[in-house]
């Protein structure tokens, strides 16, 4: 059979394995979540239709508002450094210098490291008897251990630090790919006009990378709002003192698991998480279109 005379269903045969995976592990669970969000189903099954009762409960649930606050604060705090710092690192490591490959690898290594391993390393570093507190006390900067993992706000910001550290290499790679597409003649023209490195950065590099910066902001915002492993591991699964640092994803996990898990309420929380995430992506799409129109 020639390439030009294949049967009409042939392309679908190639798509079938991928479609089967998407339908089985993405579409079906999503539809099931939509249905369960309007029921009082439990982990043991059953449940009946309750309308918007789960969402009404959500409005009256202080744990939901604490989790929403933490996830929102997480998003606001990690996006700026994850947009700026990887760009600066990419500018440094894109230069062809001896041994620069080692630094690229070093920055990218945390990206491929297991979340559990990263959590254990940072827990050891930030523990009251850990390396950071030991150094601070040896230098005489503190008299008592800093409660990085037991204080409500210090734990949250410590988790943010881990997220930024782990994401630097990933977004650095995205910026390196974008920097390769910046026309060299623009830098040469700016240099001929007397522009220094800083002036060229803001007049040439930043405008050329605006769509990429929007993409990085969107990816880091979505990942930040859906934070789970960093807070979970640093807090030992407790979500901080009294659960004060629980994120929205952690609340879903705590609500929907176990023999007493309320799957209906957890599904309603998941639906809210999906809507907020979708809103972030739509905002990003609009910003990208605006950048393309400029």
Image: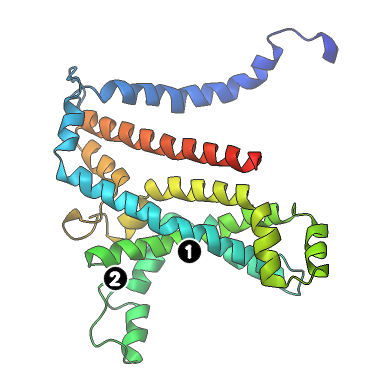
Is 214 on the left or on the right of 38, as rendered?
right
Could you classify mark 1 by the number of other residues whose Cα lies within 10 Å: few (under 14), some (14-19), or many (20 or more)? Answer: some
Q: Earlier in the sequence, mark 1 or mark 2?
A: 2
Which disc is residue 165 wearing? 1
Query: Where's residue 21, x and y in %?
Result: 52, 26
Q: Height in image: 143 above or below 259?
A: below
Q: Height in image: 280 above or below 152?
A: above
Q: Could you say which quadrant of the image residue 154 lies in?
A: bottom left
Question: Does any portion of residue 39 appear in the rendered image?
Answer: yes
Instruction: Kindly identify the residue that appears in the image at 54 percent across and 41 percent down.
Output: 287
Q: Which residue is mark 2?
A: 148
Query: Where's residue 69, x and y in %?
Result: 27, 50
Instruction: Kindly identify the residue that appears in the image at 27 percent across and 59 percent down.
Output: 236
Nearer to us in this view, 132 or 277:
277
Question: Does any portion of residue 109 appear in the rendered image?
Answer: no
Instruction: Kindly identify the residue that appears in the image at 43 percent across and 58 percent down.
Output: 78
Query: Where's residue 278, x and y in %?
Result: 43, 34
Q: Height in image: 197 above or below 252?
A: below
Q: Height in image: 107 above or below 255?
A: below
Which disc is residue 270 wearing? none
Q: Secondary structure at mark 2?
A: loop
Could you classify mark 2 by the number of other residues whose Cα lies within 10 Å: few (under 14), some (14-19), or many (20 or more)? Answer: many
Total numbered labels: 2
Q: How far is the residue under mark 1 from the one under mark 2?
A: 16 Å
């Amino acid at each position: 059979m020639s390439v030009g005379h294949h049967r009409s269903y042939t392309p679908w045969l190639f798509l079938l394995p991928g479609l089967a995976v998407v339908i089985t592990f993405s579409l079906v669970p999503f539809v099931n979540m939509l249905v369960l969000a309007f029921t009082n189903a439990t982990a043991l099954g059953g449940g009946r239709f309750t309308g918007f009762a789960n969402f009404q409960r959500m409005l009256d649930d202080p744990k939901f508002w604490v989790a929403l606050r933490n996830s929102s604060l997480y998003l606001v705090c990690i996006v700026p450094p994850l947009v700026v710092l990887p760009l600066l690192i990419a500018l440094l490591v894109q230069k062809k210098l001896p041994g620069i490959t080692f630094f690229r690898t070093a920055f990218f290594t945390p990206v491929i490291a297991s979340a559990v391993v990263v959590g254990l390393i940072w827990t050891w570093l930030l523990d009251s008897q850990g390396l950071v507190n030991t150094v601070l006390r040896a230098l005489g900067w503190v008299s008592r251990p800093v409660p990085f993992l037991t204080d409500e706000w210090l734990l949250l910001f410590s988790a943010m630090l881990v997220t930024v550290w782990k994401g630097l290499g990933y977004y650095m790679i995205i910026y390196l790919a974008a920097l390769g597409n910046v026309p060299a003649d623009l830098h040469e023209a700016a240099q001929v006009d007397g522009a220094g490195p800083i002036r060229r950065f803001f007049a040439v590099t930043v405008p050329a990378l605006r769509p990429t910066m929007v993409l990085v902001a969107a990816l880091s915002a979505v990942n930040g709002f859906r934070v789970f492993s960093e807070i979970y591991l640093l807090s030992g699964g407790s979500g901080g003192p009294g659960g004060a640092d629980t994120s929205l994803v952690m609340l879903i996990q705590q609500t929907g698991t176990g023999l007493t898990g309320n799957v209906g309420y957890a599904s309603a929380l998941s639906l809210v998480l999906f809507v907020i995430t979708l809103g972030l992506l739509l905002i990003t799409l609009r910003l990208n279109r605006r950048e393309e129109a400029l």
